[in-house]
Image (tube, rainbow, N blue to C red):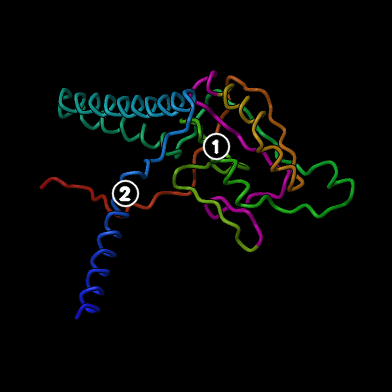
């Protein structure tokens, strides 16, 4: 009888000890500290404020469009709608655009030519990384080997060939054109590309990037891939 009572007492003490250990551990487990320095926090805050400002600008443009619709007579509503449609087409890259920018030549490295290496197409991963670097700044537009790159475009390796939206990109040399919203933005991107590791990454694949200095006017052709309307329906008057 005593042995049975002693076993129960031991079990109860074990459970109580386990619960106390869990409680002590939860009370003494410190939440992870933010170890970033002040400049890193300020940089993130600046990025968030920039996004907030861009969203406010988009809302302001939409409000102005709504005001124009409501203030225009029915006869001019079609004109306002066409202006909005043209703007959206331009933003989507369907129309040619001209602005400040620069041209980048992608060419085989001198060493690969001197040693007679086979010149291969640029890999889709490398080109995608380049595009991500360019798109770190908002508003930049691209044309890759004469093919407009838009939000509807995609990059793939198909049968050993680099393609943009299904169109084969030439084996280097070829040009990449970049147009920015302003001259200041173009110069900032230009300096960024000169200082980032993207040139080294191309060189590791036996390619050299030659980046021309920013110009006032660079023209990109419109995207010719077409657009498939799957959901919008034209409403007719009865």
Mark 2, residue position: 24
Q: In the image, which disc is placed on residue 226?
A: none
Q: Quadrant of the N terminus?
A: bottom left
Spatial distance from mark 2 to mark 1, Cα to Cα? Answer: 58 Å
Element assignment for label 2: helix
- Start-end of magenta stretch: 160-185
The answer to whether residue 201 is above or below residue 17 is above
Q: Quadrant of residue 91?
A: top left
Q: In the rendering, at what x and y percent does residue 218 appear?
A: 58, 27
Q: Label 2 neighbourhood size at 10 Å, few (<14), some (14-19), many (20+)?
A: few
Residue 142 badge: 1
Name the residue rendered at 25%, 60% in the picture: 16
First in residue order: circle 2 vs circle 1: 2
Q: Does residue 165 belong to the magenta stretch? A: yes
Residue 63 percent location from the top left of the image: 22, 26
In the image as oriented, which residue stretches furthest toward the left?
Answer: 238
């Amino acid at each position: 009888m005593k042995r049975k009572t002693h076993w129960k007492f031991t079990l109860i003490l074990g459970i109580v000890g386990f619960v106390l250990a869990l409680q002590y551990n939860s009370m003494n487990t410190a939440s992870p500290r933010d170890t970033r320095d002040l400049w890193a926090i300020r940089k993130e805050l600046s990025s968030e404020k920039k996004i907030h400002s861009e969203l406010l600008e988009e809302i302001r443009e939409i409000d102005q469009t709504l005001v124009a619709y409501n203030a225009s007579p029915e006869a001019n509503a079609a004109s306002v709608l066409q202006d909005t449609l043209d703007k959206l087409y331009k933003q989507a890259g369907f129309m040619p655009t001209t602005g400040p920018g620069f041209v980048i030549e992608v060419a085989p490295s001198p060493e690969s030519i001197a040693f007679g290496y086979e010149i291969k197409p640029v890999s889709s991963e490398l080109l995608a990384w380049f595009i991500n670097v360019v798109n770190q700044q908002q508003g930049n537009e691209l044309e890759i080997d004469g093919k407009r790159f838009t939000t509807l475009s995609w990059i793939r390796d198909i049968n050993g060939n680099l393609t943009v939206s299904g169109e084969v990109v030439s084996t280097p040399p070829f040009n990449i054109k970049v147009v920015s919203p302003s001259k200041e933005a173009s110069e900032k991107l230009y300096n960024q590309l000169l200082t980032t590791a993207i040139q080294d990454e191309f060189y590791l694949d036996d390619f050299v990037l030659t980046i021309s200095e920013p110009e006032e006017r660079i023209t990109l052709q419109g995207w010719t891939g077409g657009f498939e309307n799957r959901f919008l329906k034209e409403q007719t008057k009865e």
